[in-house]
Each structure stands twice: as C-alpha cells, then as structure tokens.
Amino acid sequence: MEKTLWHTLAIKKIFEELNSSKDGINSPEAEKRLKKFGYNKLAEEKKLSGLKIFLNQFKSPLVYVLFGAAVISLLLKDFLDAAVIMVAVFINTILGFYQENKANKSITFLKKLVDHKAKVLRDGQKIEIDSKLLVPGDIIFIEAGDKIPADARLINTEGLQVIESALTGESVASDKNLTVLDKGIGLAERENMVYSGTIIAAGRGQGIVCETGINTEIGKISQMVKDTKEDKTPLQLQLAKFSQNLTYLVIFLCLVIIVIGLVQGRPLFGVAAEAREGMLTTAAAIAVAAIPEGLLVSVTAVLAIGMQAILRRKALVRKLIAAETLGGVSIICTDKTGTLTEGNMQVSMIITASDEISTTQDLRYQSSANLKDHDLMMKISVLCNNAVITNPRDQLENWEMLGAPTETGLLLGAIQAGIPYQKITKEQPRLAEIPFSSDRKYMATLNRLDSKKNVVYVKGAPEKVMAMCSQVRTDGKKVKLTEKQLRSLKTKYEKLTGQGLRLLAFAYKKTAPEKDDLTKELKQLVFLGFIALKDPLRKETKETFQLAIQAGIRPIIVTGDHRLTAQAIVSELGLKVSEKNIIEGPQLDDITDEQLEKMVKDIDIYARVEPRHKLRIIKAWQDRGETVAMTGDGVNDAPALKAADIGIALGSGTDIAKETSDLILLDNNFKTIVAAVERGRVVYENIKKILIYLLANTFAEMVLIIGSLILVLPLPILPAQIIWINLITDSLPNLALTFENGEKEVMKDKPRKKTAKILDANMKSLIFIIGISTDLVLLGLFFILVNLTTLDIDQIRTIIFSSIALASLMYVFSCRNLRHSVFLKNPFDNKFLNLAVIIGVLVQILAIYQPTLQKILNTVPLSSHEWLIVLALATIKIIFIEIGKYRFIVKPRLA
C-alpha cells in the first residue's frame, strides 16, 4: 500500500482521510484507533539474555582448539596444562562478555525522545494525555518550548518556528505555514508538517496527527537502525581467518604426527613413567605449541589500553574493537552543524547602506556616522525580537535564551555589542506586534520612543523590508531611496547570501502616539542596512582538516543544510570546491547505487540530505574498499553511525547518536578525531608487534617438536613448559608492548586498506626466519646433547626450555620498533617493558630452581656453563631477527 504524502493534501482532504474534524475525535474512537495503530512509541528490540551473550564468546575456532588441547591434557592427567589453557579461555570469555553485555540501546534511547505529555483535543475538550496514547486523527496543540509528540499536518499557525536539526541536520529553524506542497519536496522543506521529536522554537499552532509510533519519521529511523547490519571489523575478520587456518593446521599436524609416531612404533598413550612420550601427549604438545594462548588476552588488552589512551585525548571508545579500526579510517563523512560549526547562529557582519562589503568585515565600524546606524540596528535586534532570556539575573556567561536560533543570535550579538538589554526594553516598551511568519517574511513592532513619539521597527527578508522603504540612511543622513540605490543594496545582499550567510534587513520610522495601527504604518520606512548571521566554524576545524588530509584521510561533508551554506564552510576551511563536487539529496534520489559508487570519488559536499541518503553514501565508499567514519549528533545520524565502520558522535549530541556510535567526542572537537585515529594506528602497530613476538615463539616450538619427531628424538620441550613460556614468562613483556607510544612516522603513512592483512608477506617471512634460524640451532644442539652427551633428558630439556624463554625475553626489544633497528631505540623509554622483562627473568629462574616448580615443569638446576649456552642462543636469535627486520620491513619502506 502506497504511503500517504500528507504534505501534498489540502487540510479538508486530510480530515476526510483520517475521518476526523476540527473538534478532534472522541474517547471511544480513540480507543479503537489505539488498538488498530498501537501505542505512539517505538518498537523495542528483543535483548539477548546474559547466558546467550556468555555462550557466544565460545564461538571461535581458536577457542575450540584450546578446548581440544585441554581435554587431551585432562585425559593424560596433565592437570596443570589443562588448567592454564582454561585460564586463557576464561579471561578472554569474561572480557568479551563484559563488552558485549553493554549492548546497543539505540531503540531504548529513541523511545525516550517521544515519551512525554501531549496537549490534545478529545471530546471537544483540550486535555493533556501521555503522548503514547495519541492516535491518527487527534488534534494537538503546540507552542514554544514543546517537543512534538507525533508527526502532524499543521492546521493553524501563529509565527510557528521549529528546530528540526536533530532530524534534518538543518541548523536554521524552519518557518511553518499551511501551504499545500508538491510531492517532490524533501523532508527539510515540508513547512506544513511537524515531526515527532523536534522542538518548537517560537510561536504556536495546531496540527492533526497523521502518523504515530514506528510510522513517524523517527520511527523510520529506529527501523533503519535495527535493520542496519553491523559488519565485523577487518581485525575481527582477520583474527577469525587466522584462527580457522590455525585450527586446520593443528588438526593436520596432530594427525600426521600420530600416524608417523605409530609407524615408528611409538605408543599411543605411553606407559607409566614414559606417559609423556605417548603420541597423544606429543599431539597435545604440538597443539599447545601451535596455539599462542596469550593472543586472545593480549589483543583484548592492547585494545583496552588503546581505549584508555584515546580517552585521555578526550574521546570515549564505546566498542573495544573500534580502537583498532580507527587506525584504518580513510574517509570521514562529517555533518556540518554542531560538528564543523558551533551549532548556533551568531552575528557575523553589520552592513549599513554606505558600508563597503569585504570578506573580513565584522562588527567593527567604518565611520562615526555608520556607528549610529550600527547602534540602531543592534537596538532593533533587541526590541523587534521574541527571543527571551530565561535567567536575566544570572551572570552574562550563564544566560540561557529561548527562541528561534536567528533571534537568539541577534539578541546575543546586540548584548555583546553593548546594548543594555533590560534598560532599553523598559525605556521602549512594545505597544503592538506583527509576528514573523514564513508568508510575511518579516517581523514588525510598535514601541514607545518618548512622550511625544512612537517608533516602528522592522526586520526581515531584504526584498520585503526594502519594498516598505522610501528613504535610506547613508553616512548618518536620511535621503530618498532611488532605483540606483536599490540595485546597489540588492547586489550587496545577494553577494552575502552567496557566501552562505543568513541575511536580515532592518528599517524604522517615527510616528505620532495616536497612530497605533501598526499595519498601516508599514510604509515610507527608513532603510538602515543588513545584519548577516552564520553558524560559525569551530576554531580548530581548519587545522584539523589539513591534518586529516596530510594523514591520507579524505573528509566529506554530509549535511541537511543548503549547498551554499556548506560551500561557504568549505571555503573557510581553505578548500576549493566547484559545482561538480556538490550534490543534493533530491539528486541522489534520481541516481542508482551503481551510479553513485562511480561518482562518489568526485563529490566533496552532500547537501539537503536525509538519513537514507547518508546510508547510501557510506555504502558507496565501503563498496570501493574504504574504511568510513561518520560523525553526527542528531537522531537522523543514528543509522549512518551504525552503518559506518566507525560512528563518531559528539558529546553534546543526542542519546541515540551516542549509543549507536563507536566513538564519542567528549570535547566536541573535530581535532580529537585525528588524535584518536593516530592512536588507532598505534594500536594496530602494537598488535602487529605482539603477533610477531608470540608467533615467532610458536613457530619455533612447532618446528622444534616436529623436527625431533622426524629425527626419532624425545620431545625437546614439554607441554607444561610451552604453556609456561607462552603464558607466564612471555605474558608481561607481551602486555608491556601495548604501552608503546608508536613511531612518529605513523601519521605519515597512508590509511591501510581493508584487504590489507595484519600478517602480510613481510611479517610471515620475518617470523619464518626467526623460527628457522633458532630451530636449526636449537634442534642441532638438542640432537648433540641427546646423542653425544650423558646428560639426563630433563637436564637437556631444561637447557632448551630456558633458551627459548630467555631468547623471547631478549628479542622483545627488537619487536618494539619494526621500522628501525633495536640499537636506535631508547631501551629505557618503556618502563613497563623493562620491569616485565626483569620479572620474566626472575620467574624463569624460579621455574628452574624452585622445588615445587621443578616437579611441575620437570626442570633441574643449570650450571654456569649451561647458562652461557642459553645466553649465546638468545643472542643469536636477536641477531637473526634484526637482519630479518631490516630485510623484510625496513628496507621495503625505504624503497
């Protein structure tokens, strides 16, 4: 069924469609309609139970393999191995549960926007009811300060202005009227409609409810939020793929090893004291060696620490994984109002008839004669104005103003210019008023000037005000307004309007006290000049835009404002944008998604857009392989914030924007985004360092075990010893890498592509070289010690065990910086790492000399000569990793 376009119907037709009248509907009919249409509230999503969220944490191939290794260890009564593995799973599960349990509450917060009282006409009486009881056909009453309870077609207005920025992105209040509109009119231009969740800035009116609940515009957005799929991040996908491949590899190796062992005549379970030599034990050792048990915990930790670092930079990361995704952002789709700008109208320029317009002109006066005209326009800004200060007795900086943005901007500008607000309103009280309306496009007041004269003040659209004038003040004198002067004034205001400014013209006329019919006095006025207002650019935005561009990030402006307003902002940012780089919402409706994907690279500004347009823009960039961030603060931004790879909400934004986002700017500063991206890149670099550090050991342990099996040797290192290294000795150095501040070159790199693998070919080569170089030496040493010496197997294993542990504690310093040599990095600037290595060495010494640990780990004390062998092997590993780092990472970057 085609949806009714209420803004295109005459009021009479709407009453017929809704079977209502100007007296509203009666209570019995309201009950029937409530059953038919449901409550005027938003649908709530079914929330996952705590148990379901907890069980979801185990849906990982890596966890499955760890469980398998733990089961095998239990069957073989290796309770320590099983316990340590399960601790790794438990820590990761708890961290994941904690994050996911803070589920998205977007729909709940949207519900709060419409959960309030409404004044309605029922049974011919004006009553107040809970807004959720409203039904189509109800007549509602609205006035300044009210929040609209449902979507309604206006049937009566008196100077009604509505702030719709949360829904449309338009910073200027919408002037409402009763005019029937065409079908193609966009949401921001539907001046005969009011929408749920928006706020009345000025005036009053009545409307007939057309849509309630999920059928309202906010309801559509809530549905879009619910239907928008939240894709996994590149890191999540890569870790899942890594876990899957590792699972296949482990299963394959375990099966191959068991088959080889059985062919060699080795027992499946082992016997008595030699149980650890059974093939199931060997397979468990391979599984334990292949799986970096600390990886899940380490990645979670590096993301959590990254979140804290970003928080110190005034940005709150809501979703753990987003801390890494930030580093890959290549496109920032930013709203204009409240993001690039301050979100309020301010006086930008005052121009008298004799002033020359320049781009640098502001509130400064050009002559003493013009000073009087400027002063008079500022007085009119106070007296011909319906904005009010709700707490005038407080300090100026704490004043709160109620009214349309344009009028509050004028009032604030006049006060800042030195006009005594309270004094002048008492000296020149208002006698009559013609309120502003979108039809008239002006406001006029009659004020008492003194005992002998009254005065008419007028402000409004330039073409309307100039048509009422017969004189003009130039250089402090009143002269006749000629056609030539009219053309000159028109040129001025067209030039200013073209700069994206909102322009108002001002005029006045002194009258006799007996002339109190204001309507008849609106002629032969004296024209004064113009006041230009704009939503000013935030101070840091220009610098931040340049920083983003230097970092390879492309900012795109997506706004509900007019194209000229957006273009003026871009001009202030120092960027050149031509007409071919701008597109408006209605134009987007005329092109397909395929066409948009082709042209999206050429568009810098999207104006007059609606929520559905934002989703299409983000998808078009994502289809081109870009990582997209979207900034916003309004209700209308919620679906796009969820669809974007990184949704960024302002701290001053709506609850729904915050709850749907990945990142919240606590200081509303665009510059914070760049700082967060920088830290995101550091997080990604640190994850790479951790992967190299953990996998280098993992690879070494695997090859060592497989090599010894092929050479028909005993296991060179036991499962418990492997887990000890992976989770005990290496854990603190591993976590200490998360505190690395990153290299200064990180913001000189181009954003990485979504398809870029965290384990690229160079990293794999580096890990392979570390593993092979160490393994060949260790395997050779193990072969010699087993076959050519009389050392006990536990003594030999303790040497191998200590060599791997000490080497990992030493080469962690090489992993600190993958761009430069270890010798160029200050070894003392990461105090956490130094402390971690010291603790790691002490823990390893305990593993060898503490009696209880000796029994658990099957270790024996080492002599000083044996410690020299261990130290030499660790040094060899450092040399090889530095050679490999230069060959596969540093050199390619220099090329």
Image (cartoon, helix red, strand yellow):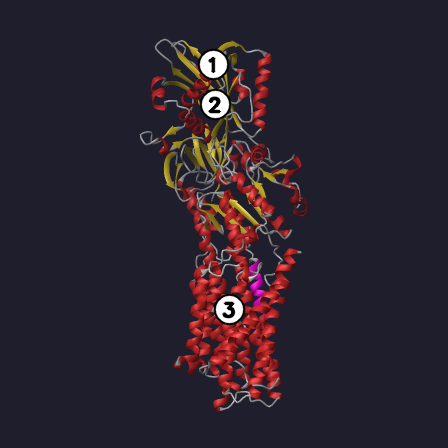
Q: Which residues are magenta?
A: 234-245
Q: Position of residue 574 (x, y in %)?
A: 58, 36
Q: Position of residue 287 (x, y in %)?
A: 54, 76
Amino acid beneath label 1: Ala
Q: Position of residue 341 (x, y in %)?
A: 50, 37
Residue 297 in view of the camera:
no
Residue 861 in view of the camera:
yes
The local crowd at label 3, few if under 14, some if 14 to 19, many if 20 or more residues have their Cα within 10 Å, is: some
Amino acid beneath label 3: Met
Q: Which residue is mark 2?
A: 364
Q: Position of residue 763 (x, y in %)?
A: 61, 64
Residue in front for this viewpoint, 485 or 692: 692
Counting residues from the N terminus, which is met first, the one under dot 1 or under dot 2? 2
| Helix, strand or loop status at disc 1 | helix
Q: Nearer the viewer, mark 2 or mark 3?
A: 3
Q: Which residue is mark 3?
A: 810
Residue in front for this viewpoint, 282 or 513: 282
